[in-house]
Image (spheres, rainbow, N blue to C red):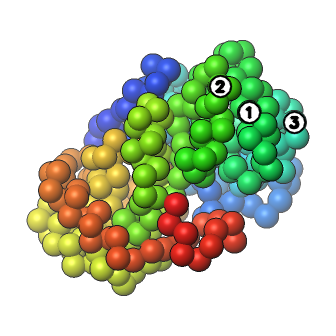
Amino acid sequence: MAGIDTPIPELKLNDGTMIPMLGYGIGTAWSKSSDTSSVDRKIVEGVKIAIRLGYHHLDAAESYNNEAEMGVAIKESKVERQKLFVTTKVALSSMADIQESFNSSLKKLQLDYVDLYLIHAPFFAKTDEDFQKAWAVMEEIKTSGKARSIGVSNYLEKHLKATLATAKIAPSVNQIEYHPYLQHGDLIPFHRSKKIATAAYAPLTAVTKAKPGPADELLAFLAKKYYVSEGEVALRWCIDQDVVTITTSGKEERLSDYLRAMRFTLNPKEINDLAEAGKPKFYRGFWQAKFNKDDRS
C-alpha cells in the first residue's frame, strides 16, 4: 500500500480558496435509500479510514442521505476542522428552498461551515431566470461565510452562461462526470476561459464500467511504465489537466493505492494521447435519462 504521508496537491480557486485535488466521495456506493435517523456505522468507518489515509477533501451531498454519517466520521476522526475541505450539494428536490436545505446539511454534518457548496444538477430549471434566482441564493450563502466557496455540478455551457449573466460571484467549481469516454467537447475550455475549476466524478470509468474500450492498450502501457494501476493512471490524467478528482472505495488498500497517483505525472503527450484514444467511444454513467443517447455535451 502507498504511504499515508503522500502529499495531495492543491488547486487555487477563483476566490482564492485552496482545494485538494484528490477527494473522497460518499456518493453512489455509500448512498442510503432514505435519510433515516439511524447512523450507518459502515459509512462512518469508511470515511474515517479515508481521513486517516490522508484524504482531507470529503465530498458529500444531500441526495445521498448520508451527510450525518460524514458528520460523525469527521467528529470521531479528531482531525482539526481547518485541515479538512468539506463539500456538499443541494438536492434537486430542495431547490425551492436552498437556504433551508443548506442549514439542514450543516446540522447533519455537525459543522459551522462547509468549504464548498454546490447545486447538484441543472435539471430544476425551466428558464434562465430559474438559474439566476437559485444562484442569487447561493451568493447569499457564500456572503454569510458559512460556505467558503460555491459552485455547481453537472452544468453544461448553456447553464453556466445563464448563471453568469447576472452573477455577482462566479461559480468556483463545476463538478461533472469526466473521463476519457466523456470529455464534454468545449466545456472544459469554457471553464478555463471563465476561471471555473473543473472537478471530476467517476474518473475511473474507463477502467471499470466502460471497459473494454479503445483506451485500454494505452492505459495498460502507462500503468506498466509508471509501476501503478490503470486506475491510478486514470486519476493522474485528470489531475495533470488541473481537474480536481473525486474517487471512492470501501477498501482501505485500494484507497491507499490510489495515493500513488500523487507520485508520478503524465507528460503532455501522454495526456493528449489518452484523450485521443478515448474519443472514439462514448460512455455516460450518470443522468442518462436527461440526455439523448449520443449527446456528448
Residue 191, position as x, y percentages in the image = 45, 40
Q: Is 132 on the left-hand or right-hand side of 58?
A: right
Point 66% across, 38% down: residue: 162
Q: Is residue 255 above or below residue 21?
A: below
Going from the N terminus, do you reach mark 2 or mark 3 first?
3
Residue found at the very far bottom of the displayed protein = 212
The crowd level at tag 3 (other Cα within 10 Å; few <14, some 14-19, many 20+) is few
The crowd level at tag 1 (other Cα within 10 Å; few <14, some 14-19, many 20+) is many
User: How many numbered callouts?
Assistant: 3
Q: Secondary structure at mark 2?
A: loop
User: Which residue is identified by label 1?
Assistant: 132
Q: Secondary structure at mark 1?
A: helix
Q: Please, what is the three-letter code of the amino acid marked with disc 1?
A: Gln
User: Which residue is identified by label 3?
Assistant: 97
Q: Please, what is the three-letter code of the amino acid marked with disc 2?
A: Ala
Q: Please, what is the three-letter code of the amino acid marked with disc 3?
A: Asp
Q: Secondary structure at mark 3?
A: helix
The crowd level at tag 2 (other Cα within 10 Å; few <14, some 14-19, many 20+) is some
Point 74% across, 54% down: residue: 123
Of the 4 image quadrants, the one containing the N terminus is: bottom left
Q: Is 178 on the left-hand or right-hand side of 63?
A: left
Marks 2 and 3, how far apart at CA: 19 Å
102 and 282: which one is in front? 282
Marks 1 and 3, how far apart at CA: 14 Å
Point 45% across, 74% down: residue: 282
285 and 78: which one is in front? 285
